[in-house]
Image (cartoon, rainbow, N blue to C red):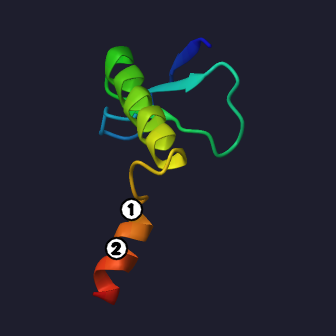
Amino acid sequence: MKIVTRYDRLPIEERSFDWTATMDSYQAGDPVGKGDTEKAAVADLLVQVDLKDYEALGLLEAPHEAAASKSLS
């Protein structure tokens, strides 16, 4: 799979969302990396994809599941 990057200078002062990165097979709901540079956006995407893979394998709890299990204890 390839990573597709895109630069969209948003009309806000914050620059940390100007670059986005997605997989070339992107569909609505898939992870989107964001950053102030192309490299940062790709890194953000890779972290999200890795976490999603670990969650699918049951090696990591999703954040909402972790919060629910803490509140039940």
Q: Looking at the picture, does residue 23 appear above or below residue 59? A: above
Going by the image, does 39 lie left or right of 6? left
Q: Residue at x 38, y 51 (%)?
A: 60
Amino acid of disc 1 = Pro
Amino acid of disc 2 = Ala
Do the residues bearing badges 2 and 1 touch, measured as CB atoms within 8 Å? yes
Q: Which mark is residue 44?
A: none
Q: Of all residues shown, which one is farthest toward the front?
A: 58
Q: Would you name the residue on which mark 1 appears?
A: 63
Residue 5's x, y, as percent?
52, 17
Q: Which mark is residue 67?
A: 2
Instruction: Report if residue 18 is visible in the image.
Output: no
Q: Of all residues shown, which one is farthest toward the bottom?
A: 72
Q: Looking at the picture, does residue 40 appear above or below residue 70? A: above
Residue 11's x, y, as percent?
44, 37
Residue density around tag 1, few if under 14, some if 14–19, many if 20 or more, within 10 Å: few
Estimate the spatial distance between the alpha carbons at disc 2 and disc 1, rounded to whole Å. 6 Å
Going by the image, does 67 lie left or right of 9? left
The answer to which quarter of the image holds residue 3 is top right
Residue density around tag 2, few if under 14, some if 14–19, many if 20 or more, within 10 Å: few
